[in-house]
Image (spheres, rainbow, N blue to C red):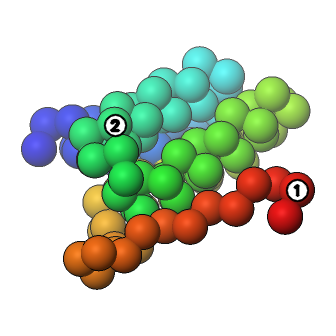
Amino acid sequence: MKVVVLACWLAAGFAAAAAADGGEPTQSSCLAAVAAAREMAERLPADDASRYFAERDLQQAMTEAGNGEFDDCLEWAEQATVEIKEHRHTLKPGETLNVRPAHE
């Protein structure tokens, strides 16, 4: 429970805190939000569909951070956190997630 609260604060709170301080989100706030969301994702089983989609959101967050778009990074990290908390994607027993390679 403590990690969930911390992750929510990191993902949503940094943007608000930066705005309140009159500044913009920073790389360190973005990386902290991504790390918290990644920790939550790693608690799900490796074959969990919600974990897969959350990890894709975190990849996009890191791409945005690399482009200097730290506000977008925080949004993607928050989306990953919501995916994990709400467990939006579930598979029925016996179903598997069929992920195609990029060239298909």
Say what secondary structure mark 1 lies in: loop
> Residue drawn at (32%, 67%), measured in percent from left and top?
87
Task: State the residue position of label 2.
Answer: 42
The picture places residue 74, in percent across and down from the top left corner, at 60, 43
> Residue drawn at (36%, 45%), measured in percent from left and top?
46
**In which quadrant of the rendered image does the N terminus lie?**
top left
The picture places residue 65, in percent across and down from the top left corner, at 74, 32
Q: Image quarter for residue 102?
A: bottom right
> Residue drawn at (29%, 60%), measured in percent from left and top?
85
Q: Residue furthest front?
A: 94
Say what secondary structure mark 2 lies in: helix
Q: Residue furthest left?
A: 1
The picture places residue 57, in percent across and down from the top left corner, at 60, 51
The answer to whether residue 31 is visible is: yes
Whether residue 36 sits left or right of residue 22 in the image: it is left
- Marking on residue 53: none
Whether residue 69 sits left or right of residue 99 in the image: it is right
Q: Image quarter for residue 104?
A: bottom right
Task: State the residue position of label 1.
Answer: 103
Q: Nearer the viewer, mark 2 or mark 1?
A: 1
Disc 2/disc 1 C-alpha distance (Å): 27 Å
